Image: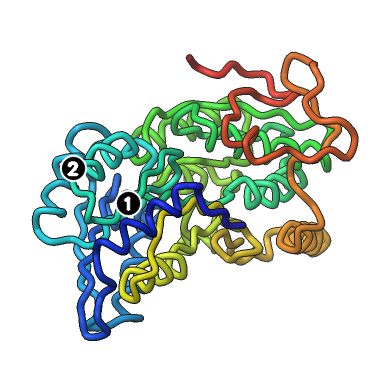
Amino acid sequence: MKFTSLLASTAMALGLATSAMAQDDKVKVGFIYVGPIGDGGYTYEHNQGRLAVMEEFGDKAETTYVESVPEGPDAERVMTQMALDGADLIFATSFGFMDATVNTAKKFPDVKFEHATGYKTAPNLAIYNARFYEGRAVLGHIAGNMTESNIIGYIGSYPIPEVLRGINSAYIHAKKVNPDVQFKIVWAYTWFDPAKEADAAKVLIEQGADVILQHTDSTAPLAAAEAAGNVIGFGQASDMAEYKDGPRVSSIIDNWGPYYIERVGKVLDGTWETADTWAGIGDGMVQIGEITDRVPEDVKAEALALMDTIASGAYHPFTGPLNKQDGTQWLAEGEVAEDQALLGMDFFVEGIDAEIPK
């Protein structure tokens, strides 16, 4: 689903001040990444989107990127340099880049910026995100069916709404098919650190988890699951298909390419304006990777059916009755969570026995 900010009119006025690119002009696009492009997960998929832009537009688009940029002031330095080097459009691809992107956009009003997973916009700053929680509902369904110990481990990056939505969605759908399921959560406090992610997975396995879910970016948790021998896991952000013959039974894939192509095209034809995009399975921005034969056929069929109902809009992963962790009602029978509530999610649902770090 897409919805355009009220700032669109301001953006249109700004567009009048800067003439639309002629058909023979080239657009220069910068990408700033929080991890290395070889992480096998989140940054890898953003870079696949960059490559899709190059393939789509050929010599009409020149792209550049900087990888492994720390979230914080250094991000502003990198984006400032990109703007000084002539970038027309800059994609900042991690939540922690938000304030740096806002600051840089103020300094360069004629440059267009897009920030992934944040919530601050401006006339020359758009935001975009994927409804990852939709994919986690499908993986939660598989996990709840597949666990034999009834303990599912979850590696969280940071306790921000995006991550909490994912944990809650996975838990709700695991619990629906397995009332005895428990979630154990370890916070890694990083998006990408293979050593920390591996340690988190090992701790969860030692606590009895035989299924590992993750909201971190490397393949290290799958490697730990493979080493354990009797543990399954899922690809995160990318297919992580190298583990398909081992612990990986499916995956959430972030498909950024079509969005990047669309937005670069709008810069080229002079129609770019600020926007707030939040797309999911139905839009193709969130995909479910191949479900392997390790998953029983009936469970696979149910997971695919769940995916289809989410994609069509017939079912929303946060549909009541649902209570918050403290037992107070959140959603009544049949009530669907509104986007604004999901964007600010700061609680676990009832049944999760863990505290959210402050």
Dot 2 surroundings within 10 Å: few (below 14), some, or many (20 or more)? few
The quadrant holding residue 112 is bottom left
Q: Residue at x 76, y 32 (%)?
A: 181
Quadrant of the snapshot with the N terminus: bottom right
Q: Amino acid at mark 1?
A: Asn
What coloring was used for the rendering?
rainbow
Q: Which residue is mark 1?
A: 124
In the rendering, which numbered label is found on residue 266?
none
The quadrant holding residue 87 is bottom left
* Tally of numbered discs: 2
Q: Residue at x 58, y 62 (%)?
A: 287
Is residue 66 toward the left or the right of residue 342 in the image?
left
Q: Residue at x 57, y 27 (%)?
A: 185
Where is residue 124 drawn, in percent x and y? 32, 51
The alpha-carbon separation of the residues under discs 1 and 2 comes to: 11 Å
Where is residue 314 drawn, in percent x and y? 81, 57
Q: Residue furthest right?
A: 333
Please tell me which of labels 1 and 2 falls first in the chain. Answer: 2
Is residue 86 toward the left or the right of residue 340 in the image?
left
Taking depth in this image into account, of 63 and 245 the one nearest to the observer is 63
Taking depth in this image into account, of 40 and 247 the one nearest to the observer is 40
Dot 1 surroundings within 10 Å: few (below 14), some, or many (20 or more)? many
Q: Residue at x 15, y 54 (%)?
A: 82
In the rendering, which numbered label is found on residue 107?
2
Where is residue 149 drawn, in percent x and y? 72, 34
* Secondary structure type for disc 2: helix
For residue 295, say whether it is visible: yes
